[in-house]
Amino acid sequence: MRVSLHRGRNLDVITGVQMVRSHWHALVQPGTFAAASLLAEIVDAFCELDLALPEVYELLGAATAALAASAEPASLVPRFELRLLAALGLAPPADACVRCSGAFNEHGAWLDVDSGGLACERCGGGRGDVNHLRSDDVANFRAVGAERGGPVRAAVTATPRTARAIDELVTWHLGKRPKARALLDTFPA
Ligand SMILES: [Zn+2]
């Protein structure tokens, strides 16, 4: 949608709106709507009014188009979340321990949500199986957060453990679980 605004003293006035492209028909499907609601809620929670973030806008636009075209919209959410964290400078390193900066060994990594990232076995191994990401999950975490066309081959979908880790990181940064997450979870993956 292209919107023309007249800048006012307090509020801007909309002087014209032109529809460029609409995904509305696809987005009103219940599962797609739930996923799109989650994206919108997260962006709204992370971003401040009046602070232009073109990269986040591009990301949301591309993700909305991808949701509208997908038969499994929920599967696209983790990549969006991790790319959003990266755009905001909040994504944790995907190849080094968030505590000691050491490399991960063949046992993978552990979600250390209190430190906002992934920890190596020595620092995070005590965090239990529920927080464990095996080596293939860690590789997936790296791929899901990767830029398209960058040095790491990007992946569109996350493994269940990677998806959970990304969700927990978003919740930790926001200080609360997004409301639309519960709605999305009611739809079978
Ligand atoms: Zn460590």
Image (cartoon, helix red, strand yellow):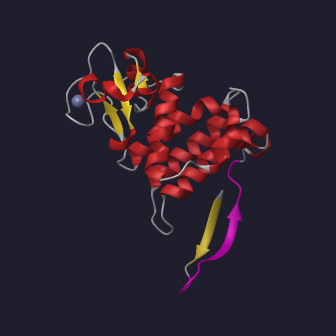
- Quarter of the image for the N terminus: give it: bottom right
Q: Is residue 120 visible?
A: yes
Name the foreground residue: 5 vs 90.
Answer: 90
Q: Which residues are magenta?
A: 8-21
- Image quadrant, ligand 1: top left
Tell me: residue 155, above or below residue 7: above
The answer to which of 69 and 127 lies nearer the viewer is 127
Q: Is residue 59 magenta?
A: no
Count of marks placed on residues = 0
Q: Is residue 153 visible?
A: no
Task: Classify residue 100 by image quadrant.
Answer: top left
Left-right relation of 95 to 4 = left
Above or below residue 99? Residue 16 is: below
Residue at left offset 51%, top offset 31% = 164
The picture places residue 60, in percent across and down from the top left corner, at 56, 47
Query: Which residue appears farthest toward the bottom when viewing the image?
Result: 9
The residue depicted at 39 percent of the width and 50 percent of the height is 88
Q: Is residue 16 left or right of residue 158?
A: right
Image coordinates of residue 121 in percent, x first then y, are 28, 22
Q: Residue at x 48, y 64 (%)?
A: 48
